[in-house]
Amino acid sequence: MAPLAMENQITEGEEEIATKYKVTIVGSGNWGSVASKLIASNTLKLNSFHDEVKMWVFEETLPTGEKLTEVINNTNENVKYLPGIKLGKNVVADPDLEHAVKDADMLVFVTPHQFMEGICKRLVGKIKGDVQAISLIKGMEVKAEGPCMISTLISEQLGINCCVLMGANIANEIAVEKFSEATVGYREDKDVAQRWVQLFNTSYFQVSAVQDVEGVELCGTLKNVVAIAAGFVDGMDMGNNTKAAIMRIGLVEMKAFSKLMYSSVKDTTFFESCGVADLITTCLGGRNRKVAEAFARNGGKRSFDELEAEMLQGQKLQGVSTANELYEVLNQRGWHELFPLFTTVHEICIGRLPPSAIVEYSEHPPTPVEDSA
Amino acid sequence: MAPLAMENQITEGEEEIATKYKVTIVGSGNWGSVASKLIASNTLKLNSFHDEVKMWVFEETLPTGEKLTEVINNTNENVKYLPGIKLGKNVVADPDLEHAVKDADMLVFVTPHQFMEGICKRLVGKIKGDVQAISLIKGMEVKAEGPCMISTLISEQLGINCCVLMGANIANEIAVEKFSEATVGYREDKDVAQRWVQLFNTSYFQVSAVQDVEGVELCGTLKNVVAIAAGFVDGMDMGNNTKAAIMRIGLVEMKAFSKLMYSSVKDTTFFESCGVADLITTCLGGRNRKVAEAFARNGGKRSFDELEAEMLQGQKLQGVSTANELYEVLNQRGWHELFPLFTTVHEICIGRLPPSAIVEYSEHPPTPVEDSA
């Protein structure tokens, strides 16, 4: 499909630029650095992309006194956020955001989600009109009026099309080329989606595309609430059987909630890497599960704030805040009965229910699957 | 819905019997004994069932010289297959198969699958004409002409309707009342399905019904092949990310294969306990996963036969034989490209490929979800 896209461009008569898409990665943390490695290996191989991959780096001075961008450009390694991994000689770190994006045909956003609003403001009028964007950012907020999709924020603020890429993606495992998958969610343009697949796909990182931006992006956030529930089960030593049941109920509630929010959401999205696979990874490992396990082991006597401070060096758990946000939405719409797991997770987090309540569904049974189909 | 079913019966004028369904469990192993505990707790509570639950027990003489049925009836405990768990005073063990089934309105089959053919032969003409059956038996064979469903065997041999009950059901965890779920698959009669749900459902064992016998029963067999793949991943220490990806590809292949075999199979069935939840449990614990892990740790140098003999005291792995049977079906129909995981698992099991091949899909990528939807 990419060749087709190229022809379309060529007719616009800018062959040199048009036939070679320029890629800029906005963000250079752990996942951003792995993304740059994946992308840089493909731009060298594929004719439709410009070899050089720009990576905007929030400049830092390292303990050695060197600038992070200089070290990345000299060593091809992000020594601070992905030490020991070569990103590729064709990755060029740039501390100047506007400069990094101005010639880009394809923008990859992979920053902490709280920075995106400010970054978008800075980029208005500084990017090409026909630029395509993709967001790798998990963890949008779910406000009372509904989820604030980061892909929507980017689209609206910059007036450009924005896809998403989500999946069972533990950055450090992909960095060492362990087999993994990911899902691209796109809105209309299948050619553009295919171009993103080509840019990210490798033999050890298999990417597929689904026409369901909202479903894919919601999975990346809602799964963290299920991981809290899975952590409670682990903390009470209830075994794999109970844990599998709780993960399943969580997956069904993720699907039901997404479909109530966006009628366009597809069931099949939840069979993709962004759905069931990311849920499994997050419920087996992951911070949310780990802290929730500790919470349950302490019988809920030590608060999440206390445990987070102790276990996460000041980081906050996505799952706990998302559960809180979800609860507000369910409240406003009278949906608590439809989402017993989402509801119970929050009530346990705030101490209204004991951790053992996570398996007490006798009064409000799980959403029947046939109804949520 | 059960009251409705009862009225229908009452009009036939056999009120005493009709309003009280008599239940017989055919089988008394580990899972059969747990099933009898679940059922016996409900027949005491619900008016539509006769309190007494008959359980056919393959008679054995215990080391103490006592008969197993006598000990069960004296102690309410299956000391051999579920020691330490009270089945309920209303469970009556009966060593005489024909006697145990002759008055039953509802038959629960839960024996090793290789015994079912012989048991069906013995029951012809010995059961009530309007008896309803359910199979809890996992592990049908997949022959070249297609899967040999155990529910179909029962229906055809005995000329009765047969539902199935499958799910993430580790007997010993349910025996101690840890939260779990199960799925009833039924063909047409929703009232009958509802009656089975009432008979099994408890606060810690949540049962739901789907109109998809084939989909539910196939899940219980195909998941074992995916568990072998998951074990290979564990044996190569590839991490949760890769394991989640392999489990997802396996789930998608389970769904695609079931739908190719039976067009009636529903996507939603795979979101049920029999689908994603049973897959998760089986890939986290379970014999198939465990022996496959050992196989991979030995780099495939020790055969499954050897490892099974060593690790399973002569038991055979369901997953290995099912993978072999599946391979034949894929061969005959030219479907290998559609099922890279099923295909690869068998080729690793027979030593044609190394265990590492389980993550080498670059040449035949996973079945696109949108196509299998």
Image (cartoon, coloured by chain):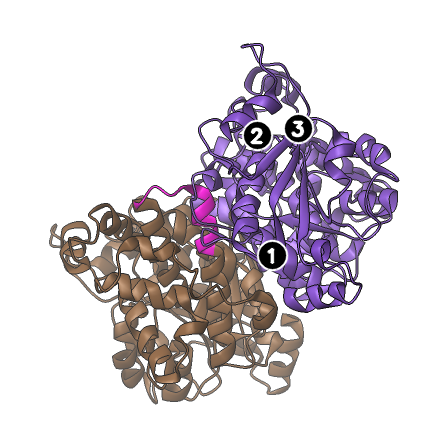
Chain colours: A brown, B purple
The residue drawn where x is 46% and y is 32% is: B85
**Quadrant including the C terminus of chain B:** bottom right
> Which is nearer the eye, A93 or B63?
B63
Q: Which residues are magenta?
A: A236-247
Say if residue B211 shows up in the picture: no
> Which mark sits nearer the N-terminus, 2 or 3?
3
> Which is nearer the eye, B242 or A332?
A332
How crowded pointer 3 is (Cα within 10 Å; few <14, some 14-19, many 20+) is rated as many
On the image, the x and y values in percent for residue B44 come to 53, 49
Q: Position of A72 compared to B328: left or right?
A: left
Q: Which residue is mark 3?
A: B57
Find residue A52 and report its image quarter: bottom left
> Which chain letter goes with mark 2?
B
Q: Are marks 2 and 3 in contact (CB under 8 Å)?
A: no
Mark identifier at residue B292: 2
Mark identifier at residue B347: none
- Kind of residue at badge 1: Val
> Which chain letter goes with mark 3?
B
Find residue A92 and report its image quarter: bottom left
